[in-house]
Amino acid sequence: MKDVGPRALGHRYGPSMRALILYGPGDLRLAEIPTPEPGQGEIVVAVDAALTCATDAKMLSRGTHPSLGPLPAPFGHEGAGTVVAIGHGAHGISVGDAAVIANSAPCGRCEWCVRGREGLCEQITYLTGMFAEFIRVPAAIVAHNVMVRPPDLAPELAALAEPVACGVRAATRSAARAGESVVVLGGGLQGQVLCAVLARRGCQVILCDPHLEHRASARRMGAWRVDDAPRDAAGLARVLAQTPGGRGAHATFAAVGDARVWESAVALTRPGGEVNFHGGPAPDDVLRLPASRLHYEEITLQASYHHTPTAIRQAVAMIADEPELFASLLGPEIGLEEVADALVSGGPKRIVRPRHAPTGPA
């Protein structure tokens, strides 16, 4: 380990730190644990800002997720910070750098990586533990998916790179072209990002969501039209009427992990169109689709999970180009003590400041 003098950078870097640890479904605890030190090729980052996420809420309620290690597990996967320690063999980053840290890195060698499908990497390295004062970043991520963040980009906006990259990745998979109709079901952050990316491609995006504030946000992100979520046949007919000739969208994105919404996405897609299932469903969710329509109308079904190193860099560039727009997607600041309640209650993404002093009695 290189001796970097992190105290000189203004960070509390003692033998222990505060961190949130997930022990099981609904069991998230604030603990005092040893402060990490970097191993070969690794770095340690002081977390300046982390973000809550709907995926975190799912992890908390289910106690499991493909990116989550064995329990008890460090928690939180969206964050940015300042490099305070560097292990031998780590290159491309220096102590004091403000870093964008992706929550995974593909191996670059397996069948899926070679095909450009890094989200399916058979040896992917995941990272959780952003809800902590410090985090040790594995060598694979340091080598492939850590970058110095652009000047003047706030850490909470840099932390948005991970979720924005997931939306960028999904939109990139779509063949929808300028002037074509796109329906996005779900106005959470993924739906908002899809609006932004596809609208800038020139698509006419219709975003459907039951919440007025989500629809207003989608307008700011570039949606052509907004509507309530279609809950029944009448709702589906209402949305279909807004597509060219009433025949359905050229591309439909289900940005909600609910099989019923996925079925609606197929119903809203025109012959020859495509559907992207984007949003993690429960393990026991079952999808029922009209096989005859899929066959005779040649509807393409695809899904999008996670992101790639290229998508991370595209996301950072997007955010840096329009920081005020993306800042509008963030909610208030909270401390580590408030994360569990925030995940249970839902609402906008919260900005978590792990190294702020506790709000309660000393």
Image: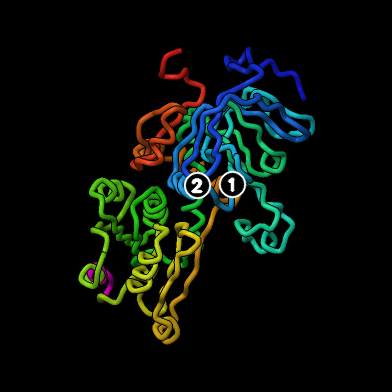
Query: Which residue appears at 25% of the width and 76% of the height?
Result: 245
Judge by depth and name the residue closer to the eye, 237 or 338.
338
Which range is magenta? 239-244
Amino acid beneath label 1: Leu
- Give the residue at x 55% y 40%: 23
Q: Is residue 332 above or below residue 77?
A: above
In the image, 231: left or right of 322? Answer: left
Judge from the rendering whether residue 205 lies leftward or rightward of residue 339; answer left or right: left
> What residue would you read off at disc 2?
59
Quadrant holding the N terminus? top right
Q: Which residue is mark 1?
A: 68
Q: Are marks 1 and 2 in contact (CB under 8 Å)?
A: yes
Residue name at image x 38 percent, y 41 percent: 344
Q: Nearer the viewer, residue 170 or 28?
A: 28
List x then y, in percent, for residue 351: 42, 32
229 displayed left or right of 282: left
Secondary structure under tag 1 reads: loop
Residue type pointed to by label 2:
Met
- Dot 2, crowdedness within 10 Å: few (<14), some or many (≥20)? many
